[in-house]
Amino acid sequence: MKTFKILFLGDIVGPLGRKGVKKYLSYHKEKDQIDFVIANGENTTHGHGLSYEHYLELLSYGVDVLTSGNHYFGNPDHLKKDKEMDKQIRPYNLDTSAPGVGTRTFEKDGITIRVSNILGKTYLTMTQQNPFLSLDELVAINQEDIHIVDIHAEATAEKRCLAEYVAGKVSACIGTHTHVQTNDAKLLKGDTFFLTDVGMNGAYYSSIGADLESCIQRTKTGIPGKSDVPRKGKILVNGVLLEFDRESKKVLSYQLINETMEDDPE
Ligand SMILES: [Fe+2]
Ligand SMILES: [Fe+2]
């Protein structure tokens, strides 16, 4: 039985994150017969936002759509290249005047897919509207076969509550933002897939993708300092592969991806 497979990759952090995505997809996209690839791109460019150059780079590796989060404004290209970056999805519940859109639809091999991105409120102090109300709106407009929601939030309980709120109404609620993969993948009532956080793609020897030395110094002393991302070294690749039934459009199986790989030699 031919199924439909969607790979969701966690937050891509800096050059090692981009390299990890390239390496992973160059081998697995064909081998695992992956039909559609979603990745969170909010930390792609030096850890902050997504430049147009890196947007094109990730698409060239086989990523179909890039979601975002609280770092959406971290790179100015979302202002200059808003129209060209039409496979990027910003948090839906940002202010209505924010550039970009928070949900987009795609078609692949006869299957229609909606990808949405929402931002939690707990510990994330932007001006986002209530994410529960945003989910109501997204569920109401959806007519696609598969609806994947990237829940970009800090608090585990908020993510679970948001997912339970739409259980049975969307195909999957996949958490992003903490950069730490959780071990709680499950099907909620109505067969909605849920994972609190899918993790990150970036430096293995890091603190959530950032340079260890500067992170430790900042955390130890409380003195603000420069945040950097490692450019060389071992790579962590995190994601989840969802397999859908082409008839029912339900999730048949899921597989967490938590791989380490060596960097290219100098
Ligand atoms: Fe992130
Ligand atoms: Fe984030």
Image (cartoon, rainbow, N blue to C red):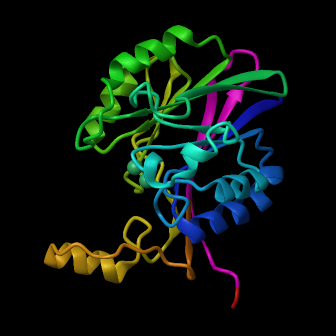
Per the picture, the main secondary structure of the magenta-coloured stretch is strand
- For the N terminus, the image quarter is top right
- Residue 246 lies left or right of residue 166; in this view the side is right
Q: 98 or 205: nearer the eye? A: 98
Question: Which residue reaches farthest front?
Answer: 80
**Is residue 212 visible in this depiction of the protein?**
yes
Task: Say which quarter of the image contains residue 225.
Answer: bottom left
Viewer-proximal residue among 248 and 121: 121
Above or below — where is 153 with respect to 164?
below
Tell me what residue is drawn at x 37 percent, y 70 percent. 207
Percent position of residue 197, x then y: 42, 46
Residue at left 30%, top 75%? Answer: 215
Image x and y of residue 174, in percent: 48, 37
Q: What residue is rendered at 65% in x and 59% in y?
A: 54
Q: Which residues are magenta?
A: 238-264
Q: Which quadrant, please, contains the C terminus? A: bottom right
